[in-house]
Image (cartoon, rainbow, N blue to C red):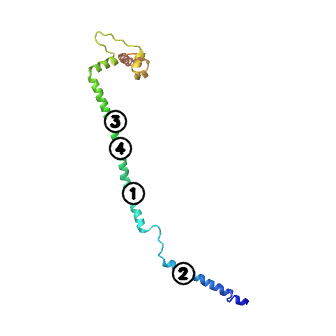
Amino acid sequence: MAEGRGRFSTTTRIKVLGEQAAARVYRAQSRRLRRPARRGRLTGRAALLALVVCALAVALAYPLRQYISQRSEIAEQERLAEEARERVEQLRDEKARWQDPAYVEQQARRHLHWVRPGEYGFVMPEAAEAVEEPERADRGRGAVARPWYDNLWDGVDRADRSR
């Protein structure tokens, strides 16, 4: 009965198992051959499309950069034009003030120390003038306390002495 249990010998069994494995491999290979071949991710059409998109990007990059720079130049010129308009408006206002004889007289009295006939002119010490015109205070103590004509004559005298 020991022989009845195994009808085939070990060699025969291994041979049958080998044939079954070979048949499975053959079936798997034939299935792979019947399936359409898997294409790569990048097909010819996709590559052509990518090439066209890149060419368009390169072709449009320079004109787009020029457009952006010109728009920024236009914005800068518009800003400068607006500043110029504001300055023109300020100058028109100042011109209108200078057309007024009372304003001209006020400026002459203030800056040139002019007086009307019969009036007495006084030049105050440096404190009053420094308060009145603080931008002149940084030119030195002598220039602040004196009227403009004294500074003018001192300049002429200094130029005369240097010869």
The image quadrant that residue 25 belongs to is bottom right
Residue type indicated by callout 3: Glu
Q: CA distance from mark 1 to mark 3?
A: 38 Å
**What residue sits 40% from the left and 67% below the top?**
45
The image quadrant that residue 90 belongs to is top left
Q: CA distance from mark 1 to mark 2?
A: 50 Å
**Residue carrying label 1:** 57
N-term mark: 4 or 1: 1
Residue type indicated by callout 4: Glu
Q: CA distance from mark 2 to mark 3?
A: 86 Å
N-term mark: 1 or 2: 2
Q: Nearer the viewer, residue 158 or 130?
A: 130
Which of the numbered marks, if any, corresponds to residue 83?
3
N-term mark: 4 or 2: 2
Density class for disc 2 (Cα within 10 Å; few <14, some 14-19, many ≥20) is few
**Residue 44 shows in this picture:** yes
Residue type indicated by callout 2: Arg
Residue type indicated by callout 1: Ala
Density class for disc 1 (Cα within 10 Å; few <14, some 14-19, many ≥20) is few
